[in-house]
Amino acid sequence: MSPGRVSNITFDEFYNIIDGKQKGASKNYNGVNPATKEKLWDVPVATKDDVNTAVEAGQKAFKTWSKTPIEKRKQMMKDWVKVYEQHEKEFADTLCKETGKPRSFATSEVAMVKGMILHHSDLDIPEEKFEDDEKIVTTRYQPLGVVGAISPWNFPLLLAVGKIAQALLAGCVVISKPSPFTPYTVLKLVETAQEIFPPGVVQVLGGGDDLGPALVEHPGVAKISFTGSIATGKKIMESCAKTLKRVTLELGGNDPCIIFPDVDIEKTVPEVAVGSFWNSGQVCVATKRVYIHESIYREFVDKLVAFTKNNLKVGTSDEENVMLGPIQNEMQFNKVKEFFADSKKNGYKFALGDAEVAASKGFFIQPTIIDNPPNDSLIIREEPFGPILPVQPWSDLEEVIARANNTDTGLGASVWTKDVKKGEEVAQRIESGNVFVNSWVKPVPQAFFSGHKTSGLGGEWGNTGVLAYCNAQAVHVYK
Ligand code: NAD
């Protein structure tokens, strides 16, 4: 590939990108379209040698890229958006196939990629100065080096580019590693970047289960930015300790939602339903526990059931009015089914849906609401990452705040009340990194995104997330 060959990017052949070039492999693997269970295109399995070559190419590219003036780097990021834009339709088509999500949601994820790059292309890296009679102290933030950016399958494009954009702004080079369940759009995203950035600045490797560990263990990688499950996050942190690599972890959550008695029920019900079930619940910050004031509990639950049943249609990407696609992969489908089986076994009340997940052509599950399961139930304690939602009543504010916080995760949360001041007070008492008042959790690139407790370590985005890609250096100059 060389600059100007944008039109040559095709979406029916997929390669790793190492040192500016397409790279195949002797072994291939395939993703599966979760709506049809059909095999998708071949993808080369990157080897340990590929990891070594990519890290070497990254280290070489870093020497120049880190010295490239930030204004030039920012301009190149803007130029990249122009290349990417030419392929938006193909990105949306491919995203529909690899994730099964409804086309409108795929299209909006494709558009959000631009927003993420452009947000970072307008930021500056801060510099702090302190002066007294004898000295001037300047703290500068310098790029770390080669970043390994490991991302999951629920928002393949958005979560990958969120890391790539920050690394580029900081002056780091980056090796992206998509989930083996959804490699396609990320491989192509990085291919588009080759039209703009020098070889080795943005690379991508797709592969099997041993690829992530190989990248994390590599001594030439300066930082790992990881989004995925808590279990994998713990393994990554353990492995990073061996080389004292910098690490940012964006992990799972079990987001509570507290509904006050004063809400406008008609307006709030659709919002809570969408916040819980969008992307079929496969969202780290989806609402996962709903606490409704007892005085409106029955009416709210009945309306939540009716709205979900009538408006959140499950189907394939291009069916009309579809709001929810399939579960993205079989492993996750089976995991979600365990929450159904456990709820059935324990005799919990299914306000919507039933315990049987019908066999179908794809990994589809109808949205399901469990009415008032006990606090120690699996569905309250753990993140299903699928469309099954528990609801419970509350009467005492202190008690419900304690219930909301009774989890070792702390990613997102929402509080719904007409009393905005009260809502904000309660929001500040929720032990989560991202709390919303009168909205479901909608992260934006402009806000720092992080998890408390086991939901993560450090954070990214906002105006200061880029600092996670930098070493600080304080230079003390005595006059
Ligand atoms: P996962 O942890 O199984 O995999 C995530 C990525 O890590 C994949 O690319 C995978 O190949 C790679 N990986 C797996 N084992 C590895 C290892 N030992 N070393 C290095 N890399 C390894 O997670 P998933 O199932 O893809 O994603 C779902 C989870 O991600 C959910 O728990 C969800 O809440 C969480 N998530 C969090 C956020 C957030 O921003 N906090 C966003 C989306 C998803």
Image (spheres, rainbow, N blue to C red):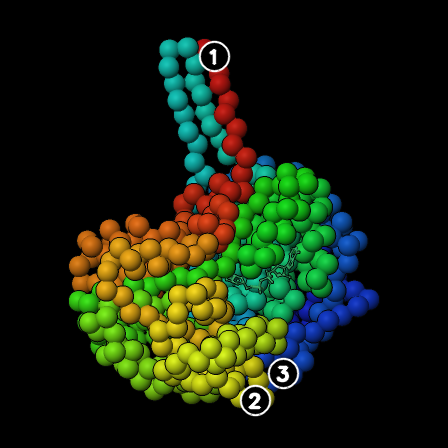
Relative to 360, does residue 188 appear above or below in the rendering?
Answer: above
Q: Residue at x 76, y 50 (%)?
A: 53
Q: Could you tell whether 10 is left or right of 227 in the image?
A: right
Where in the figure is residue 56, as x and y percent of width and height? Answer: 73, 45
Residue 344 screen position, x and y as percent:
48, 81
Q: What amino acid type is highlighted by mark number 1?
A: Tyr
The CA distance from mark 1 to mark 2 is 73 Å
Q: Nearer the viewer, mark 3 or mark 1?
A: 3
Asked whether, in this view, residue 106 is left or right of residue 183, the answer is left
Q: Nearer the viewer, residue 65 or 183?
A: 183
The residue indicated by pointer 3 is: 37
Q: Which residue is mark 2?
A: 360
Can you tell me whether the CB of the residue at mark 2 lies under 8 Å from the nearest atom of ligand 1? Answer: no
As helix, strand or loop, the secondary structure at mark 2 comes to loop
Quadrant containing the N terminus is: bottom right
For image coordinates 48% across by 40% down, the residue present is: 467
Residue 60 higher or lower than 82, as above or below: above
Name the residue nearer the viewer: 312 or 374: 374
- Residue 133 is situated, as x and y percent measured from the top left of the image, at 37, 11
Residue 38 sits in which quadrant?
A: bottom right
Camera sees residue 32:
yes
Amino acid type, callout 3: Lys
Circle 3: element type = loop
- Number of the front mark, 3 or 2: 2
| Quarter assignment of residue 100 | bottom right
Q: Is residue 326 above or below residue 285?
A: below
Residue labelled with disc 1? 478
